[in-house]
Amino acid sequence: MTALPVTSFPVMDHTPSKTRAALWMSGWLALMLIVTVAGREATREVNVFQLMAVRGVLGLLMLWPLIHISGGLAVLKTARVHVHIMRNLIHFCAQVGWFYALTLIPISQVVAIEFTMPIWTAIVAASFLGERMTALKIASIVLGVVGVVVIVRPAAGEISSGQVIALAAAVGFGVSIAIVKSLTRTEQTLAIIFWLLVVQSAASVLPALYVWSWPPLQTWGWLVVIAFCGTFSHYCMARAMLHADATVVIPMDFLRVPLTAILGWLVYAERLDVFTALGAVLILTGNALNLKPIAAVPARART
């Protein structure tokens, strides 16, 4: 894998601010929790490829007003189409796997396994984007992953196909998010989301037509919810990436694990026990470490 190129483009406003990054990530968390429930409900009636195709087309329609008021087609201009295509094909495969895993194992387990993702994000970001891995960042990731393992507690020697698919999706998401961080250095947020929807719509249209069957009316409601929340959750994530390193932003997403466990308990009566609570404490501790300001180096120490 080669380094992701950064060429001469207009400089994006990415003033470092963990507070702004956290605010944008709260939007991501809320929307992704809704997508999790909507995805499980929709896949009761439609194929995953059909879901992805409808999501892409509806997402483009929903995004257009924001594109229009932000300057029209000019805001979508890019000289890094190849990077967009690479990132979005990786993300497409991961997203298909994620939705399919929702039909096989509990939603809390899907999301928990997904959170091996920061390992892959951190490796790619540190290796190819030049991000610095501090002791606090490493501790944050380790605590988060340990918390996930405590929640999932996989049976020794017994791994289901759903778990394998969820893990493969996590690898894809991790690589995809690292590439997004590269794109935020040169690309407008709307351009990143636009190319996501275009590439994923194109990738899913033929498989969707092959398995197409008209969904019931109530399922169309879930598909609209997925399109809206899926589109604008990525907008929130991309905005967060403008204000903090990927290795800072992604551990904030660990909060989705305990929140999804609670959601699964409330909506689907999935088990919520002391292990989930312990895992949540570890995850929250990791996030607290990650958000701790780095002490300034004294002037004499720098000379």
Image (cartoon, grey):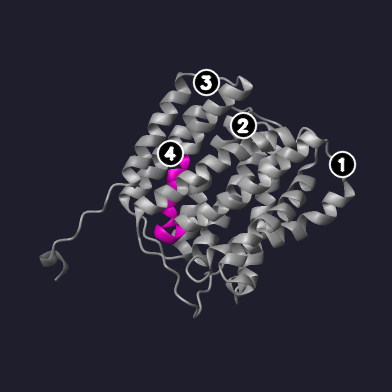
SS label for mark 4: helix
Q: From the viewer's perspective, is the residue at label 1 or at label 4 nearer? A: 1
In the image, the segment drawn in magenta is 241-254
Question: What residue does disc 2 label?
Answer: 107
What distance separates the C-alpha of mark 3 from that of mark 2?
12 Å
Separation (CA) of disc 2 from disc 1: 26 Å
Query: The C terminus lies in which quarter of the figure?
Result: bottom left
Looking at marks 3 and 4 on the same chain, the residue that comes earlier in the sequence is marked by 4
Measuring 80% from the left and 39% from the top, which residue is drawn there? 46
Task: Name the residue beneath numbered marker 4.
Answer: 144
Query: Which residue is denoted by mark 3 in the rendering?
Result: 272
Mark 1 residue element: loop
Label 3 and label 1: CA atoms lie apart by: 36 Å
Q: Are marks 3 and 4 in contact (CB under 8 Å)?
A: no
Mark 3 or 4: in front is 3
34 in relation to 262, above or below: below
Q: Which mark is residue 19?
A: none
Amino acid carrying label 4: it is: Gly
| Residue pointed to by mark 1 | 214
The amino acid type found where label 2 is placed reads: Ile
Front residue of 216/251: it is 216
